[in-house]
Structure formats: structure tokens, C-alpha cells
Image: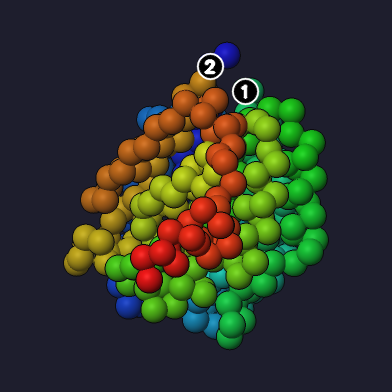
């Protein structure tokens, strides 16, 4: 079976320049992205959300429409996920109308893989995101009934990876992840098929292995904090086959590859606290 090829783009942040986001360059970079897609001819294009830097309802409707126009010439199937900035002033229904597609949870079978668009709630509260029971249960059903490898896409990551040196999240880690993402990670632990997870939101390229599953975050199209003062201009190509390979292009290039079979192998569950493990506790007490 031919590999499945998916182009990913994240955190476009079209709008005015804000903090380290160079939103004013988004439309010009989208033109380059369209050229890349035309040449690479992937099976699908996925936008991981935060298409705009929100201002108010009227402005945001205009900004989202401009991004919809920027995607329109792409002849390959395009799928969108909403990020927090797409939701601050606009509803999911308004985004659905602008992008002409349902934006709830979806699965798309491509080749031997199942692409999972997990559109969990991205509304930000003062204490961070909330993961609703409905969002959790939908994903639990997909994982439990999986009869093929899963490539899961979300705006907000669930790995809980460290945020040291991240411009936005080093001092705001509670906004980088769902607070109860450990429950999602526990759910993934039961998966017996290969699983890979891709997210946006944190504006940097990372990979974090959790229990054999690679959790990849995709740099924002217009972010500058890793290559100041220029925008990263990041998009990338994911190839799903017996090997999973991810390559992000732009000023912040990044590559990752792993055998798909390795992502189906769960790791030995971590030790409890050393003080609750008699063999270790006795050593520690002896040294004291
Ligand atoms: Fe963002």
C-alpha cells in the first residue's frame, strides 16, 4: 500500500503583529504554502487551528474569511480544527460556515491509516482549558475500536511536555495542555495499534515520547521566537507507512522518524514514588 501523505500547517495567526507572532506575513506565507501543496500533492491538508489572532467579532469574521480564501485554491482535501484564537469571539458554527465543513470530531480513513481529527473544546478560561466528558468519551471510543493505526490531530497537545524556554508557556504551563490530559494519556496506554499524535498551539517543533507514542508539536507559520525577527514559515509533510516520518520546513526545520510498529509497543509502567518502593526506600534511609 502506498504511504499516506498529509501536509500539516499550524497556528497561522493571520492578523496584526502581536508579541512574537508576525501575523502580517500570514497571507504571503499562505501563498508559498499553496505552491508547496500543489507540488507535493498530499492525500490531505490539515490545519491544526489558531488561524487568526483574534481582535473582536467583526474583525475575526473578516480574518477567518481571508484565511478561507487563502485555502480555497488548494485542490487536495483540506480539513480544519479550531484553536483557542478561532473561538475567542466566534462559535464553532460560525467557523463551520466560513470553512464550509463540519468542525466537530471526525475520522478519515486514508490508505491503511485512520486520521483522527480530535476537535476537543479550545475555549480558554482563567485557569486554562477544560476537557469535556463528551470529548474524552469520543476519543475513548475511537481508540478502543481502532482496527488500524491512528494519526491523531488536535490543537492543544496532551503530552504535558516541558515548556522551558517557550516564549508563551514557560511561565504559563497550565495554558499549554489540558489540565486533565493524564486521563487521555492513560486512555492511549490501552491502544494496541500504532499511534502518533500531532498538535499545534505551543508554537514550536518538538517530539515527546509518552509510553511509546510520539507526540509531535508543529511550529506556527508566523511565529518568530525561535528565529527572531523572521517568521518560522513552517509547514510540513507527514508520511504514514511502515515508517512514520515527519519533516517540517521553513526557517525552523525539524525531522522525526520512527517505525510504526514501535509506536504500538507500550512501555513498562513507571515506578511509584521511591519512598513507596521498599528496595529504594531502605537504601535512601541507610544513606541518611
Ligand atoms: Fe497559537
**Residue 252 visible to an observer of this rendering:** yes
Q: Is mark 1 within 8 Å of ligand 1?
A: no
Which residue is found at the position 56% from the left and 70% from the top?
Answer: 84
Residue 256 lies in what quarter of the image? top left
Badge 1 marks a residue whose secondary structure is: loop
Badge 2 marks a residue whose secondary structure is: loop
**Circle 1 is placed at which residue position?**
111
Which residue is found at the position 39% from the left and 79% from the top?
Answer: 171
Q: Which mark is residue 2?
A: 2
Residue 28 in the image: x percent, y percent?
33, 56
Residue 108 in the image: x percent, y percent?
68, 36
Q: Which quarter of the figure is the C terminus placed in?
A: bottom left
Which residue is found at the position 44% from the left and 49% from the top?
Answer: 208
Residue 51 against residue 6 in the figure, above or below? below
Residue 277 against residue 19 in the figure, above or below? above
Left or right for 135, reference 61: right
Q: Is mark 2 within 8 Å of ligand 1?
A: no
Residue 35 in the image: x percent, y percent?
36, 39
Residue 284 lies in what quarter of the image? bottom left
**Residue 158 visible to an observer of this rendering:** no
Q: Residues within 10 Å of mark 2 (few under 14, many from 20)?
A: few
Left or right for 40, reference 195: left
Amino acid at each position: 500500500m502506498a504511504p499516506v501523505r498529509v501536509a500539516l500547517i499550524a497556528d497561522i495567526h493571520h492578523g496584526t503583529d502581536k508579541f512574537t507572532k508576525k501575523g502580517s506575513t500570514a497571507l504571503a506565507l499562505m501563498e508559498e504554502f499553496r505552491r508547496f501543496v500543489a507540488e507535493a500533492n498530499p492525500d490531505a491538508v490539515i490545519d491544526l487551528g489558531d488561524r487568526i489572532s483574534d481582535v473582536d467579532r467583526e474583525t475575526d469574521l473578516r480574518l477567518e474569511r481571508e484565511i478561507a480564501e487563502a485555502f480555497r485554491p488548494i485542490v487536495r482535501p483540506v480539513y480544519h480544527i479550531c484553536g483557542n484564537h478561532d473561538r475567542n469571539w466566534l462559535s464553532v458554527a460560525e467557523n463551520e460556515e466560513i470553512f464550509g465543513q463540519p468542525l466537530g470530531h471526525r475520522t478519515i480513513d486514508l490508505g491503511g491509516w485512520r486520521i483522527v481529527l480530535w476537535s476537543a473544546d479550545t475555549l480558554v478560561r482563567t485557569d486554562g482549558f477544560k476537557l469535556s466528558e463528551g470529548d474524552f468519551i469520543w476519543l475513548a471510543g475511537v481508540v478502543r475500536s481502532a482496527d488500524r493505526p491512528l494519526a491523531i490531530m488536535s490543537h492543544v497537545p496532551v503530552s504535558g511536555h516541558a515548556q522551558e524556554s517557550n516564549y508563551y508557556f514557560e511561565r504559563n504551563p497550565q495554558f499549554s495542555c489540558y489540565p486533565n490530559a493524564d486521563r487521555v494519556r492513560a486512555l492511549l496506554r490501552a491502544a494496541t495499534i500504532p499511534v502518533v499524535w500531532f498538535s499545534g498551539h505551543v508554537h514550536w517543533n518538538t517530539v515527546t515520547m509518552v509510553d511509546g507514542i510520539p507526540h509531535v508539536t508543529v511550529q506556527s507559520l508566523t511565529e518568530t521566537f525561535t528565529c527572531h525577527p523572521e517568521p518560522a514559515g513552517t509547514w510540513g509533510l507527514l508520511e504514514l507507512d511502515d515508517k512514520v516520518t515527519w519533516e517540517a520546513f521553513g526557517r525552523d526545520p525539524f525531522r522525526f522518524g520512527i517505525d510504526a510498529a514501535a509506536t504500538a509497543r507500550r512501555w513498562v509502567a513507571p515506578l511509584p514514588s521511591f519512598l513507596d518502593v521498599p528496595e529504594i526506600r531502605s537504601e535512601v534511609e541507610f544513606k541518611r
